[in-house]
Amino acid sequence: MGPRLFGGHAIAQALLAASAPEDGARLPHSLHAHFLKAGSSAHPVRYNVSPLSAGRSFAVRRVDGYQDETLIFTMTVSFHVEEEGYEHTSPAPFPLDIDAALAGLEAWRTSDAEASGNPIIERLQKRPIEIVPIDPGLLFGSRKREAKTAVWMRMREPSGADPVLQRALLGYASDMMFLRNALLPHGIRPGSDTIQAASLDHAVWFHETPDFDSWHLFVTESPWAGNARGLNRGHFYDRNGRMIASVAQESLMRPKGDGREAAAAES
């Protein structure tokens, strides 16, 4: 995981903390998080929950995350009772074929020169979320590519049916493979010594309760980057094509070293 606290970890833990007072009466339908300072993965985070409003249908709480006495993270979470209403959804823009994605990943790992020795492949194997990209070369390669990707995700181990936990797991996963979308058109990936990259804020809207023990397709894109920041957005779909959640994030993508000259040449 590295020395820095993973943003998705803080999101999941804060969501569970904010949900505790509900006891299942209302479920979280949206969250908005801000990463204030880099946290350490070697030290625990203390989450303080404050009620902001509560009505018959909705409730809102703020969660502040501290390491020692330093505020490193803050998030608001809105809760809503389940209600009947009108429905519509956009279809998934990629084929819902996990078998083809698995075959494509294996073919890339055995035949593409960029796959050999790529450290991210091994790091991902240590995460609790299994990830299978639609196009491994686009996601993991170093060439300039379109700022649009898709990955299949699911839990490596069964997690159970608790709806709050399932939403927390999706919140954790929603920060994986995400900020790199804004870097793709520039031929840069997170971890490069030419860029300082970090999540600045992160929002999730839960449309349905996911079953994250099963495969979900996370379709992502970056419509804009500028001023050393990038905008990323995405949607989760289940294998039946239902849109389960939507995600948006602004990320820091500050050029450094040789990256400053490359960024100046592009502008």
Image (tube, helix red, strand yellow):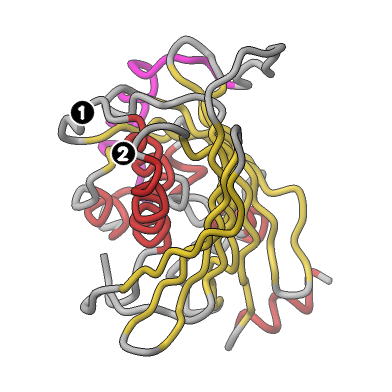
Is residue 103 on the magenta stretch?
A: yes
Magenta-highlighted residues: 94-114
Picture coordinates of residue 65, whole percent (x, y): 41, 72
**Left of 26 or right of it: where is 56?**
right
Q: Left or right: where does residue 15 sit relative to residue 231? A: left
Residue 183 lies in quadrant: bottom right
Q: Secondary structure at mark 2?
A: helix
Mark with earlier residue (2, 1): 1
Q: Quadrant of the rendered structure where residue 221 is?
A: top right
Residue 178, percent across and down? 52, 51
User: Residue 21 in the image: x percent, y percent?
Assistant: 37, 48
Tell me the residue that label 1 is attached to.
160
Q: Which mark is residue 123?
A: none
The residue drawn where x is 75% and y is 61% is 225
Q: CA distance from mark 2 to mark 1?
A: 8 Å
Indicate the quadrant containing the N terminus: top left, top right, bottom left or bottom right: bottom left
Classify 88 as above or below 160: above
Chief SS of the magenta region? helix
Q: Give, as a three-letter code, the residue at label 1.
A: Gly
- Front-most of residues 224 and 68: 68
Residue placed under numbered mark 2 in the picture: 165
Residue at x 43%, y 26% (from the top left corner): 209
Q: Is residue 108 found inside the magenta-colored segment of the image?
A: yes
Residue 52 percent location from the top left of the image: 59, 59
Q: Amino acid at mark 2?
A: Leu
**SS for tag 1?**
loop
